[in-house]
Image (cartoon, rainbow, N blue to C red):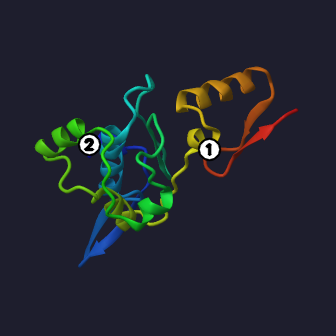
């Protein structure tokens, strides 16, 4: 992962013998895998795009489309599930050696970041991620919804 991609993430440290080694608070292996998965498994019929936001304490990765093929978040946590929404794109990522094995992504992410959170607001509402964003913007513009507090630890407040 390029240095520019992780410059916002807090750096911790670990000792290797007598030497200190800087270690990002968010595992770059997990972040890499999640970003590759977002591109391999997104719904390309939706005109929205994969979004990656890197904060000091977390990374948010959003991609158009919900989970594919009846898979649930609980299934993902069990690991070693491989249902490819875009087999040609997945095969391309494998040929350029960005995907090493099918069904390996989620176990790798969970190994490095066991407390990862998955959210699927669009699926719960039965609308696209683009529609979720547009509705939030409309509610904010009408003065009906506002963000209280920081991105982490804050919350959305309904005003009326």
Q: Is label 1 in a helix, a strand or a loop? A: helix
Q: Residue at x 30, y 55 (%)?
A: 82
For disc 2, the marked residue is 2
In space, the residues marked 2 and 1 are separated at their CA atoms by 34 Å
The structure residue drawn at horizontal position 40% and vertical position 56%, both measured from the top left corner, is: 26
Label drawn at residue 12: none
Q: Tell me where residue 88 sits by quadrant.
A: top left
Residue 15: image location, x then y, percent: 30, 74
Residue furthest right as drawn: 160
Residue found at x 61% / y 31%: 132
- Decide which of 127, 95 is in the foreground and name it: 127
Q: Element type at marker 2?
A: loop
Q: How many marks?
A: 2
Please tell me how crowded label 2 is: few (under 14), some (14-19), or many (20+) other residues with Cα within 10 Å.
Answer: few
Towards the viewer: 155 or 13: 155
Against 23, residue 136 (above or below) is above
20 over 17 or under it: above or below: above
Dot 1 crowding, Cα within 10 Å, few <14, some 14–19, many 20+:
few
* 55 horizontally vs 82: left or right: right
Q: Which mark is residue 124?
A: 1
Viewed as shown, does residue 152 lie left or right of 5? Answer: right
The quadrant in which the C terminus is found is: top right
Q: Is residue 141 above or below residue 37?
A: above
Of callouts 2 and 1, the N-terminal one: 2
State the image coordinates of residue 47 (x, y, percent, origin top left): 43, 22
Above or below, 142 against 67 in this view is: above
Q: Is residue 12 left or right of residue 93?
A: right
Nearer the observer, 20 or 130? 130
> Residue 94, how many percent across, how many down?
16, 46
Image quadrant where residue 148 sits: top right
């Amino acid at each position: 992962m390029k240095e520019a991609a992780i410059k916002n993430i807090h750096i911790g440290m670990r000792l290797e013998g007598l030497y200190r080694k800087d270690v990002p608070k968010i595992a770059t292996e997990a972040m890499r895998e999640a970003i590759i998965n977002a591109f391999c498994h997104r719904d390309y019929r939706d005109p929205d795009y994969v979004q990656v936001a890197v904060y000091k304490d977390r990374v948010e990765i959003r991609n158009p489309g919900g989970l594919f093929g009846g898979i649930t978040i609980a299934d993902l946590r069990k690991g070693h599930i491989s249902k490819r929404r875009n087999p040609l794109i997945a095969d391309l990522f494998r040929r350029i050696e960005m995907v090493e094995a099918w069904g390996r992504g989620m176990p790798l992410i969970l190994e490095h970041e066991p407390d990862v959170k998955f959210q699927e607001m669009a699926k719960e509402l039965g609308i696209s991620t683009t529609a979720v964003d547009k509705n939030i913007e409309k509610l904010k513009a009408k003065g009906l919804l506002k963000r209280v507090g920081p991105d982490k630890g804050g919350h959305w407040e309904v005003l009326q």
